[in-house]
Image: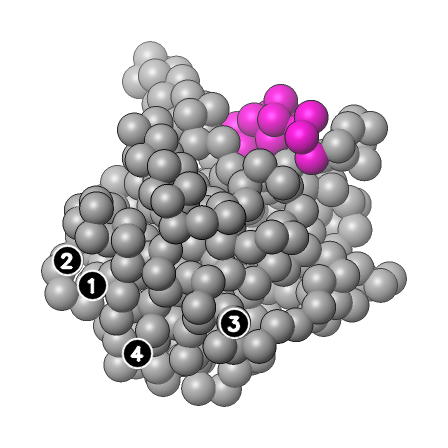
Amino acid sequence: MNGGEDTVWCLRDRWLRPRFPLVMGILNATPDSFFGASRQATVAEALRTAERMLAEGADVLDVGGASTRPGAADMAEADERERVVPVIAAIADRYPDALISVDTWRAGVAEAAVEAGARLVNDIGAGLLDPTMLPTVARLRVPYIAMHMQGVPRTMQHDPRYTDVAAEVTLFLSERARAAHAAGIADVVLDPGFGFGKTTAHNLALLRALPRLKALGLPVLAGLSRKRMINEVLGTAPDEALNGTTVLNTLALLNGADLLRVHDVREAVQVRTLLERVKAYC
C-alpha cells in the first residue's frame, strides 16, 4: 500500500482508511525525554495530555516508556512495560476511538501494549534490535513503523558517517519493509529517523530527499519535533524550537511526508490545514 487514498490499515479488530497526512502526538511516560514538557509523570497526567491532544486534532497518540534521546542508557523490559501499559490501557478505556501507537523496540512490550489497546507499533530498531519483533507484529495484525538508526541511542551520535545518507537510508528502509512484509506484516510505514545516528547535515539532506523515500510506495513518517537539527541551526533550546519545528514540518509535508510525529499537535494541525487550503486553490 502507498500513502494515498487507497491505503487501508488492519488495526487488529477493525479496519481504517487513514486520511493522510496524519498528526501523531508524542506522549512520553518517561522522566528523562529530551523535551521536558513531553514527560508524563502519572497516568492521570497522561490522560489530561491525551485529552488535549485529541481535542487539538491528533490522529494518533504515540506512547513510549523508554527514552531514545542521544546518549540514553537501556532500561529493563519490565520497567518499560510498567510505564507504558497502564497509560495505554487508561487512554483506550477513556477514549475507545483513539488510535494509539506504542513506541518500543521490544516485542514483549509491543504485545502487552497491543493487548492493552494500542493499534500501531513504532519501532526505532526496524526489527533488528529484537529478532522476535517482526513475527510478533505480524501475529498481532497491526501496522508497523520501521525507523532507520545508525547505532543505538547510547552511541548513535558518536561520529555518524555516510557516503550518501539519502541512498543508504532509503536502501535500508526498503530492505526492512521487505523483511516486514515477508514476516507477514501487511501495513508498513517508513521513518528515516531524523536525529538517530545523523548529523544536522545528514538530517537536512534527508529532509530534501524525502521524495526518494516516498518512491518506495509506502507511507513516510517525519519526526522532526524540537530536535537538535533545529537547535544547532537556530541557536535555540528544545523549549524554544516550536517555530523551527513548524518550518520543518511544512517542508516535510511539501516533500511528501504522510505522518508528522510532534510534541505540539495544534501547530502541526494548523500546518496541515493551511497547506491543504493552499493546494485547494492551486
- Residue type at mark 3? Asp
- Tell us which disc is closer to us: 3 or 1: 3
Cα–Cα gap, marks 1 and 2: 5 Å
Give the farthest residue toward the top: 281
Cα–Cα gap, marks 3 and 2: 32 Å
Q: Which mark is residue 138?
A: 4
Which residue is under mark 2? 15
Cα–Cα gap, marks 2 and 4: 15 Å
* Nearer-N-terminus badge (3/4): 3
- Circle 2 SS class: strand
Cα–Cα gap, marks 1 and 4: 11 Å
* Nearer-N-terminus badge (2/4): 2
Which residue is under mark 3? 79
Camera-nearest residue between 276 and 30: 30
Cα–Cα gap, marks 3 and 4: 24 Å
Residue 246 falls within the magenta-colored stretch: yes
Q: Which residues are magenta?
A: 238-251
Q: Position of residue 16 (x, y in %)?
A: 18, 52
Give the farthest residue toward the left: 14
Cα–Cα gap, marks 3 and 1: 29 Å
- Residue type at mark 4? Ala
Q: Is residue 177 visible?
A: no
- Residue type at mark 1? Cys
Q: Position of residue 132 (x, y in %)?
A: 44, 86
Examine the rendered structure and indicate whether residue 146 appears above or below residue 109.
above
Check if mark 1's residue and mark 2's residue have beta carbons within 8 Å.
Answer: yes
- Circle 1 SS class: strand
Which residue is under mark 1? 10
At a point 27% along the width and 65% down the height, the residue shown is: 116
* Nearer-N-terminus badge (1/2): 1
Q: In the visual, does 77 lie left or right of 116?
A: right
Assign the magenta stretch its main secondary structure: helix
